[in-house]
Image: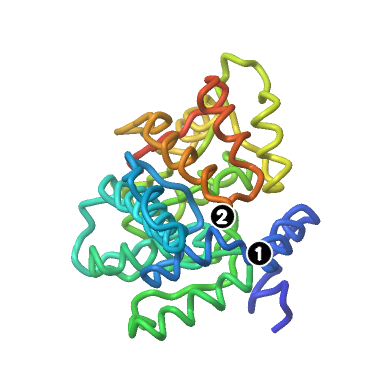
Amino acid sequence: MSPTTTATAPVLKSLYQRSVADYWNAERNPVNLLLGDVSGTYHHHYGIGEPDWSVLEGPEDTREQRTIEELHRLETAQASFLLDHLAPIPVGGRLLDAGCGRGGTSFMANQRFGAQVEGISISEEQVRFANEQAERRGVADSARFSFRNMLATGFETAAFDGIWNNESTMYVNLDDLFAEHSRLLKPGGRYVTITGCYNDVYGLPSRAVSEINSHYICDIHPRSAYFKAMAANGLVPINVIDLTEATIPYWRMRARSPHLVTGIEDAFLEAYTGGSFHYLLIAADRV
């Protein structure tokens, strides 16, 4: 099997998708790997909640590790909050993690719900890593990861009780994404996303949002685009929660961590505190 095909069709359907896949195949960022090493659960998203700022005090030789552990706690809290809004999931249910990264939220869902979880990514390296983690955890029969495109997954219609995107919607066209999610969800199934989106009031992305787009090779959508695309594809929002204030402390702590900064922290803080960028949870039901 070639690196760009499944048994039935090409996975990467554009040069842009190839560029995104290349980025994540090569990514070895300490802020993802060092934080994941804390518990063996590797996230590819950000955190929410008030940090324990005391970790920045005390002995300097252990300060970095204390900060890593605290940031990991906040990222895990974000994933747990997402899963709170996915529940309830029936016993023996089936879930899809669209844009699964190294599998962190998938493993949390598998453990919480006892469900079969399918994680998909266009990064073969992420898929390899996540499947290796599943083997180490002894859950390879119930948490599986595959090289697939979230816009054309190849899974059967009405296959899933729940689907989520955890900070991965900015890489795709929302109409195409929600059309595929709507096809895959059973009637009454739940979809949840946590995502950054730019404030429509600004008209166009702010300078800080444009900097984030450039850094991650993504295209952050306006807030309104989510609700328009959901409405067009049979997904009815049941909860919309503004997490902007809840994520700002995470970014402030990360910006004070010299071994973890990536250079994009100031742009996130400028965008969030200036009001041009929002961090939302949207939960919707398939009707």
The answer to which of 12 and 103 lies nearer the viewer is 103
Residue 287 shows up from this direction: no
Q: Quadrant of residue 234?
A: top left
> Where in the figure is residue 201, as x and y percent of width and height?
57, 14
Q: Estimate the spatial distance between the alpha carbons at disc 2 and disc 1, rounded to whole Å.
A: 14 Å
Q: Quadrant of residue 128?
A: bottom right
Question: Which of the two labelled residues, at mark 2 and mark 1, occupies the earlier sequence position?
Answer: 1
Extreme residue in the right direction: 15
> Where in the figure is residue 199, as x and y percent of width and height?
55, 22
Q: How is the image coloured?
A: rainbow
Q: Amino acid at mark 2?
A: Leu
Examine the rendered structure and indicate whether residue 246 appears above or below residue 41.
above
Label 2 Cα neighbours within 10 Å, binned few <14 / some 14-19 / many ≥20: some
Q: How many tags in the picture?
A: 2
Q: Quadrant of residue 238?
A: top left
Question: Which mark is on residue 27?
Answer: 1
* Residue in view at x 49 percent, y 29 percent: 278
The answer to which of 165 and 24 lies nearer the viewer is 24
SS state under label 2: loop
In the picture, the quarter occupied by the N terminus is bottom right
Q: Amino acid at mark 1?
A: Glu
Residue underneath mark 2: 260
The answer to which of 224 and 7 lies nearer the viewer is 224
Left or right: residue 283 versus residue 147 is left
* Residue in view at x 32 percent, y 39 percent: 50
Examine the rendered structure and indicate whether residue 184 appears above or below residue 38.
above
In the picture, the quarter occupied by the C terminus is top left
